[in-house]
Image (cartoon, helix red, strand yellow):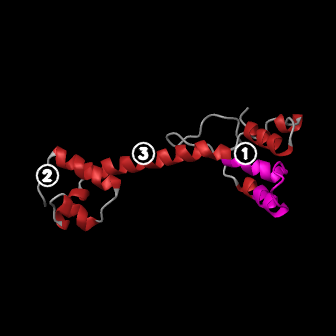
Amino acid sequence: MAKRISRKRRDALIADVFEARRDLSSLAEAHRMTPDDLADWIGRDENQKCLAGLCLLADLQTQLMLSRYRQVAVTELIKQASGGDETVSVEQSRKACVDLLKADLKRAEVNGKAPAASDDGDGVSDDVLASMRAALFGGEPSAEEAKPRSGSKA
């Protein structure tokens, strides 16, 4: 088993792995390690835990970025689906409708739990559905749409 490396060298190696700019061979060479040393290093729990945490953080940043731009994308699809954009063909409008119907509207989970909302277990709150219908078809949601669906936690 390879000897432990200093904190400074470990931090540099972690940063280099996270940046993902080197293949394994050049990574080992850049940090004056053999492939066996590198394999031993990554086999240590503290290194795996650190890199797993960084991967989770990168995934969360990606989700946040997608969430920010999702509203813009859905707004554009709504314009196309509802005929609000005269340059859109009938086929494009139909495809926009299909994309909207397929849109995944589940809310983000925190520690494995969805945020509290009036929801019947499908991850889509009644308010979100009513708002989408109003945006798609214009006007305010009807009294029927505004009522909670059966099984909702109102």
Q: Are marks 1 and 2 in contact (CB under 8 Å)?
A: no
Q: Tell me: 80 left or right of 57.
A: right
> Crowding near pointer 2: few (<14 within 10 Å), some, many (20+)?
few
Magenta residues (range): 73-98
Q: Mark 2: which amino acid?
A: Arg
| Element at label 1 | helix
- Farthest top residue? 154
Which secondary structure dominates the residues rendered in magenta?
helix
Q: How many numbered circles does the render carry?
A: 3
> Which residue is the site of mark 3?
57
Q: Mark 1: which amino acid?
A: Thr
Q: Tell me: 32 left or right of 134.
A: left
> Which residue is the site of mark 2?
4
Tell me which residue sits at (30%, 55%) in the image.
17
> Crowding near pointer 1: few (<14 within 10 Å), some, many (20+)?
some
Decide whether residue 76 is among the magenta residues.
yes
Q: Tell me: 46 left or right of 113.
A: left
From the viewer's perspective, is the residue at label 3 or at label 1 nearer?
Answer: 1
Q: Is residue 25 above or below residue 53?
A: below
> Crowding near pointer 3: few (<14 within 10 Å), some, many (20+)?
few
Tell me which residue sits at (86%, 41%) in the image.
138
Upstream in sequence: badge 2 or badge 3: 2
State the residue in front, 64 or 85.
Answer: 85
> Which residue is the site of mark 1?
75
